[in-house]
Amino acid sequence: MPSPELDIQNLKISFDTPKGKLTAVNGISFHLNQGETLALVGESGCGKTVSALSILRLLPEPPAEISSGKILFSGQNLLSLNAKALQDLRGRSISMIFQDPMTSLNPVLTIGEQMAETLLRHTTMNRQEALQKSADLLSRVELPSAKEKLKHYPHQLSGGMRQRVMIAMALACAPRVLIADEPTTALDVLIQAQILELLENLKKENGMSILIITHDLGVVAEIAQRVLVMYAGEIVESGPARALLDNPLHPYTKGLIASVPKLGALNKKGARLEEIPGNVPSLDQRPSGCAFHPRCAWAIEKCKTQKPQLRETDNQRQWSCHLEPGSL
């Protein structure tokens, strides 16, 4: 079996706060295979974006601290790289699409200037060649009048166009791994579908791997081969996307799936949207035992005091729950 493109081992991330050192990500492990799309899902505050940013060492250190674990890319631990080696890696071997393109793009530079900067840093192109390559990339992500768009500033583009620019920038140096943090947030349904189709096509063309961070299970069903479900800084379930969505083993996963609005369901008299009661616990108020037990409809006494261990089935499913499969 070939080694994974990315291998995260026992990653633990904490933050210095006025209340002391608080753990945001608590010993997670996962891998990303070559040519695979892996989805990391969960509510806001579960630790998804913190985990993603840590891969490229983009968390501010301090207050953030990666206190243990390994982040292996091509067998090399990224946590041991110096600043220059990390800068060379970012954008060239591993790229990231950030959550909000309007705040990620520089408002006082044209699209062409920002795209060319990436190419000039990581390639031997001159400025003219970099601008031509930038126009080609914008055409590749299906942005009309690509050469004209190079002269525009971010505020002159629509949300969907800005997201396409971010994707083009991320793909400029043909990375092996693309991290996409909520790439369809704030886009209408039609544009969302176009962006997801674009990512899938570009993945096949480039043979790259994608780690997509999202809270949208519709996105997961559309694009992912495997899914990791994260809650309160820990992975509580993982497995092949179709199997996990059809038959969740963890109460939290089941709650996430049940809370997705279903077409026509609200037309029935007395119908209500399902929801998971309560909120994700803050870093300084993590419950004892299973972190999900205060919100769980199936919680038993054991859940309040004993943390469940990660269990595994023979079909690549993992989950951490005291309850047996089929009891939900």
Image: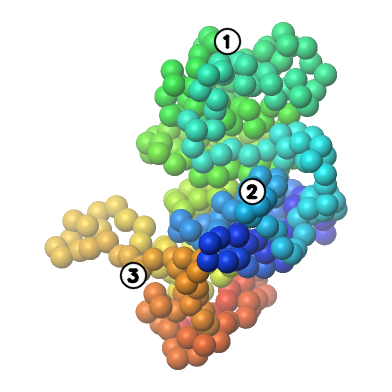
Give the answer, above or below, for where 39 lies relative to 304: above
- Which one is closest to the eye, mark 3 or mark 1? 3
Q: Which residue is mark 3?
A: 277
The CA span between labels 3 and 1 is 50 Å
The CA span between labels 2 and 1 is 34 Å
The reply to whether residue 247 is visible in this rendering is no
Give the answer, above or below, for where 315 lies relative to 182: below
Residue 142 in the image: state x and y as whole percent: 54, 22
Report crowding for label 2: few under 14, some 14 to 19, many 20 or more residues within 10 A (C-alpha). Answer: some
The reply to whether residue 21 is visible in this rendering is yes
Report crowding for label 3: few under 14, some 14 to 19, many 20 or more residues within 10 A (C-alpha). Answer: few
Mark 1 residue element: helix
Q: Which residue is mark 1?
A: 147
Among numbered discs 3 and 2, the one appearing first in the sequence: 2
Q: Which residue is mark 2?
A: 59
Q: Nearer the viewer, residue 258 or 113?
A: 113
Residue 42 in the image: state x and y as whole percent: 49, 59
Report crowding for label 1: few under 14, some 14 to 19, many 20 or more residues within 10 A (C-alpha). Answer: some
Q: Are marks 3 and 1 in contact (CB under 8 Å)?
A: no
Residue drawn at (43%, 84%) of the image: 299
Residue 307, picture quadrant: bottom right
- Which one is closest to the eye, mark 3 or mark 2? 2
Among numbered discs 2 and 1, the one appearing first in the sequence: 2
Give the answer, above or below, for where 306 lies relative to 128: below
Specify the farthest residue to the left: 269
Specify the farthest residue to the bottom: 301
Q: Nearer the viewer, residue 323 or 242?
A: 323
Mark 2 residue element: loop
Going by the numbered disc 1, the residue's amino acid type is Lys
